Amino acid sequence: MTNVRGPPDQLHVGGLALEDLFGFLPTPPGVGLGIAIGTYTGRASLSVACDRTLMGDSANELLALMIAEHARYCEAGCEARSYRYE
């Protein structure tokens, strides 16, 4: 697990505004789970990487629980953000 504090102000690349920024923590050999939490312009992002060969069905169960918790959080009044689940 890692957390990275990003810039509080919006960045620009080639004159274009960078809308979102999030980290990715690749799992090294023998590690089944990597979680990265980062911030950018006052918003937090979460990235999860699972090695299914090490975690088996637990990887899908963990991601399903995290997505369900995210939905409950959003229902409680936070701004909804999109996510991708594969």
Image (tube, rainbow, N blue to C red):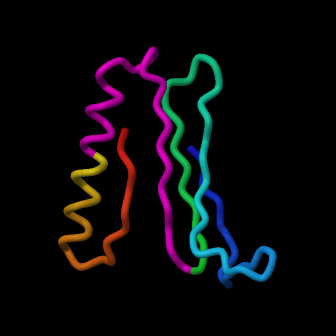
Task: Please identify the quadrant where the N terminus is shown.
Answer: top right
Q: Is residue 85 above or below residue 38?
A: above
Total tally of numbered discs in the picture: 0
The residue furthest right is 14
Is residue 55 located in the magenta-colored stretch of the structure?
yes
Residue 39 position by quadrant: bottom right
Q: Position of residue 26 (x, y in %)?
A: 62, 35
Frontmost residue, 67 versus 20: 20
Residue 6 position by quadrant: bottom right
Q: Position of residue 78 (x, y in %)?
A: 30, 77
Task: Please identify the quadrant where the C terminus is shown.
Answer: top left
The residues colored magenta run: 42-65
Is residue 17 located in the magenta-colored stretch of the structure?
no
Q: Position of residue 43 (x, y in %)?
A: 51, 74
Residue 41 position by quadrant: bottom right
Residue in the image at 31% along x and 25% along y: 58
Q: Is residue 26 above or below residue 36?
A: above
Residue in the image at 78% along x and 82% along y: 15
Residue in the image at 23% along x and 79% along y: 77
Is residue 70 shown left or right of residue 5? left
Frontmost residue, 67 versus 12: 12
Residue in the image at 65% along x and 60% along y: 4
Q: Is residue 69 above or below residue 81?
A: above
Q: Is residue 5 above or below residue 37?
A: below
